[in-house]
Amino acid sequence: MSESESTRSTRVEGDQSVRQVCANGVCMKTNVVEEKLDEGNIQEAESALRDGLSLNFEEARALLGRLEYQRGNVEGALRVFEGIDLQAAVQRMQPSISEKQPSKKGRSRSESTHAVLQHSASLVLEAIYLKVKSLQKLGRLAEAAQECKGVLDAVEKIFYHGIPDVLVENKLQATVSRAVELLPELWKHAGCYPEAMSSYRRALLSQWNLSNDCCVRIQKAFAIFLLYSGVEVGPPSLAVQIDGSYVPKNNLEEAILLLMILMRKFCLGKTTWDPSILEHLTFALSLCSQTSVLAKQLEEVMPGVIHRVDRWKALALCFIGAGQNKSALYLLRKSLHQHEEPDDIMSLLLAANICSKDVFLAAEGVKYAQRAIANAQGVNEHLKGVGLRMLGLCLGKQAKNSSSDFERSRLQSEALKSLDSAIALERENSDLIFELGVQYAEQRNLNAALLYAKQYIDATGGSVLRGWRLLALVLSAQQRFMEAEVVTDAALDETTKWEQGPLLRIKAKLKISQSLHMDAIETYRSLLALVQAQRKSYGLLLSLPQLEDDRINEYDVWHGLANLYSSLSHWKDAEICLGKARGLIKYSAETLHTEGIMHERRGQHSEALAAYINALLLEPNYVPCKILISALLVKMGSKMLPVARTLLSDALRIEPTNHMGWYYLGLVHKGDGRIADAVDCFQAASMLDESDPIECFSSII
């Protein structure tokens, strides 16, 4: 049947108030039918349609209900639709429509019959769909969903091989597509979330011959539902799983899969660009720390779709999340170029934040932070405190790379001044409180550091691990080891099992500081068991950077045990632990440092010197080995003192608070006859030794 022969409702020319319906090549005015409907005579109206247009019962009812629905009489339309027996209509249509298409030889008569049946199916299914819409408008959502499900069940019975992509009436296909898209929405609004989930999967896995746009809308709606509904369901049933195919394990994985399919469709030109899809994908991948995957998706988007500066900034955030700070900084430099957006405050703050973590980039970070502060005006004035904070962090890091004591002191003073200015603007910012505590601790102003450490714990309610670590380290620097241990035990009670690793390591070192070596060994054993259990429990779920962190944690345990056994002259145990550490990280300055100490304590000075030199070849700025090489050179006589002095000066430039460096520099000055300089160095070594923490303060940043 041609499209012009399908049932339709039109206006009669010259009279806009009179409509007509056409079916089977016959047209009739609707005014007579509408008068009977107004009088409540549904049967008479139905009979008029059946006689006038040669329709069966279901077709007449379908047309009559549609007329009522178009007139806005939803309740009246619903009463008419209630009389349609969908199952009986399906039984009549099922054997013929679902048959295989005939050959060309006998196609003309068969095609005509096939078209008539499709037309009948279209009328009945559209009627049930309008019944669904009527129920929806009346707020009877659960009933509407059941009726809509009935439409799809009927379609599957009629087309049990799936809807073919040819020889299907457009109106029938449109009704099916609308019903497929509507059903999960009805279940959602009815509060039946498992049914909504099943309906979404049914829509995407069954053969409905949906248009690409319709499929995209369903996939997007399903992904949003998976991400934000808060309803967790299992993976698709085994019946729809294909051998060897990827099967999502949870809502998040399924949502990411759908959103990546949508991104792929756009890249292939199968759908128009929808920025909200990228926003949802960004949220989903950020939840599981897979920002590197998001970066690949951004890189695949064709140029011109996203403004290049916006793309650079988004990629920079992705790389920061993936721990690739150098790549992120490279992109931010491009976005801050004078011909792009040089005054974008968010990019400036991001760049400054990256630079604040690297000694060699700190000077560049200072410039970014100063530009950010200068641009923190108007709507961005609230970011001035963030800019001052970044400036203080960058200045503090820059001070560590300063070549002179005067310059270092000046930069440290400016760093504290900037952080104090920031805290004046953001008094409730707990991160600022913590960073001020660390800055004061690194400058050995331990009383101020202790005050800020306690203030940070109060501000966070003791829920953040690094606050307890800072407090314990400050107390250890004040030689209050028992109090530091009490703090560590309290922190262990406040934290979950998997977060206790750093605290157990501090506790072991506190035991060593109190000469409780056996207790320290037991603590290290507990820490080792924890790290190994954590890796076994979560190893398959952790990202690569997290896995590397776990390997480093286990390495730290074995290395700490090796140092402990070495100090006790338990050489065999020390060598076993050192071998375990070397198995995790084959080439490490720390491992060679410990190996050198073991050789030196056993009187093997040549082997010790070789180990220290190898450590410096791996890590040229490794301070402990510079100091120990100098110590060996001092023992070799006055001819080696200039070399030792050079190494010690370089070591103290990198780490000016190292008390052993000052001690050996004092020995060098004493050997050269500079007694006054030696006294100053010994005095500095004594003062720093009295304020030396069991771990470097920067280890908790």
Image (tube, rainbow, N blue to C red):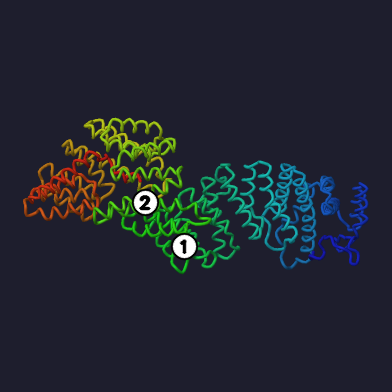
Can residue 135 be seen? yes
Can residue 501 be seen? no
Instruction: Give amino acid for label 1.
Output: Asp
How far from the left and from the top, in percent, is residue 354? 39, 55
Crowdedness near tag 2: few (<14), some (14–19) or many (≥20) residues, C-alpha within 10 Å: many
Instruction: Name the image quarter holding residue 167.
Output: bottom right
Quadrant in which the N terminus is drawn: bottom right
At mark 2, the secondary structure is helix
**169 and 364: which is toward the camera:** 364
Instruction: Give amino acid for label 2.
Output: Leu
Precedes in sequence: disc 2 or disc 1: 1
How far from the left and from the top, in percent, is residue 151? 73, 49
Left or right side of 43 for 276: left
**Is mark 2 in CB contact (under 8 Å) with mark 1?**
no
* In the image, farthest residue toward the bottom: 339
Q: Label 1 belongs to which residue?
A: 343
Left or right side of 558 for 357: right
Q: Label 2 belongs to which residue?
A: 393
Calculate the distance from the C-alpha at mark 2 to the C-alpha at mark 1.
21 Å
How far from the left and from the top, in percent, is residue 381? 50, 54
Crowdedness near tag 1: few (<14), some (14–19) or many (≥20) residues, C-alpha within 10 Å: some
**466 and 220: which is toward the camera:** 466
Left or right side of 657 for 452: right
How far from the left and from the top, in percent, is residue 580? 25, 43
At mark 1, the secondary structure is loop
